[in-house]
Amino acid sequence: MHFLSCAAGYADVIVGEKHISNHIRSAGRNVSSGALVCSSPDEAVNHLVIVLA
C-alpha cells in the first residue's frame, strides 16, 4: 500500500485490490488530482482504450 499510494501522485493509472483502491480514492478527495485508481486490470484497460482511441 505504501508504494501504491506514492505512485498515485505520479502515474496516470494505477491498479490495486478493491480494498486498497477504495482507501486511495477516499484520500484523493483531499488532494490534487493524480492517477486514475482502478480496482481491476479490466477497468484500467478499458480506460486506456478510451483515452488512446
Image (cartoon, grey):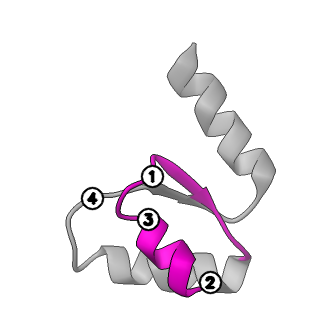
| Residue under pointer 2 | 20
Amino acid at dot 2: Ile
Q: Position of residue 37 (x, y in %)?
A: 53, 61
- Mark 4 Cα-neighbour bin, 10 Å: few <14, some 14–19, many ≥20: few
Q: Secondary structure at mark 2?
A: helix
* Residue that carries the numbered disc 1 in the rendered image: 11
The residue at 43%/55% (across/down) is 35
Q: Position of residue 25 (x, y in %)?
A: 45, 74
How crowded pointer 1 is (Cα within 10 Å; few <14, some 14-19, many 20+) is rated as few
Q: Are marks 4 and 2 in contact (CB under 8 Å)?
A: no
Q: Which residue is mark 4?
A: 33
The residue type indicated by label 1 comes to Ala
Q: Earlier in the sequence, mark 1 or mark 4?
A: 1
Q: Nearer the viewer, residue 30 or 8?
A: 8
Residue contact at pointers 3 and 4, CB within 8 angstroms: no
Q: In the rendered structure, which segment of residues is drawn in magenta?
A: 1-17
Which is in the foreground here, disc 2 or disc 1? Answer: 1
Quadrant in which the N terminus appears: bottom right
Question: Nearer the N terminus, badge 4 or badge 2?
Answer: 2
Question: Mark 3 or mark 2: which comes first in sequence?
Answer: 3
Of mark 2 and mark 1, the one earlier in the sequence is 1
Give left or right: position of 50 versus 25.
right
Residue, far front: 3
Q: Residues within 10 Å of mark 2 (few under 14, many from 20)?
A: some
Closer to the chain start, of discs 3 and 4, is 3
Say which residue label 3 marks: 8
